[in-house]
Image (spheres, grey):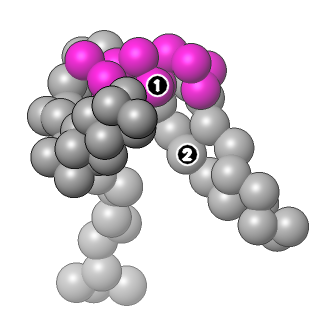
Amino acid sequence: MKGKSQSIPKVPKVHPDLAGFEMNIDSFGQITTTLNRDKLNTFLDKEMPEDKKRKSKKDESNEG
């Protein structure tokens, strides 16, 4: 068939620390990943800015 090219799935650009990370949802709705949850949380804690709302709630809970 002319005019039809096979499309190659594009690989998204990711942070080097997350190279090879894949996330899927199975038929039961369970999320499966190729990266350990603790490693992912450590990465997010390091790379994501602190949430102002969450920070103020932590401050309030420490006061009383």
Residue 3 position (above or below residue 16): below
Which is nearer the eye, 3 or 55?
55
Q: Is residue 39 left or right of residue 56?
A: right
- Please state which of the two labelled residues, at mark 2 or mark 1, is closer to the viewer: 1
21 on left or right of 35: left
Q: Mark 2 points at which residue?
A: 23
Q: Quadrant location of residue 32?
A: top right
Q: What residue lies at 33% left-to-right and 31% top-to-bottom?
A: 63
Q: What amino acid type is highlighted by mark number 1?
A: Leu
Q: Which amino acid does label 2 sit on?
A: Met
- Could you give the CA–CA distance between mark 2 and mark 1, rounded to whole angstroms? 12 Å
> Looking at the image, which residue sits at the far right?
28
One can see residue 11 in this view? no
The residues colored magenta run 36-46
**Image position of 61 with respect to 7: above or below:** above
Numbered mark located on residue 40 in the image: 1
- Mark positioned earlier in the residue sequence (2 or 1): 2
| Mark 1, secondary structure of its residue | helix
In percent of the image, x 41 and y 17: which residue is there? Answer: 42
Q: In which quarter of the image is the N terminus?
A: bottom left
Mark 2 closeness class: few <14, some 14–19, many ≥20 residues within 10 Å: few
Q: Quadrant of the C terminus?
A: top left
Residue 46 against residue 22 in the figure, above or below: above
**Chief secondary structure of the magenta portion:** helix
Residue 7, magenta (yes or no)? no
Asked if residue 59 can be seen in this view, the reply is yes
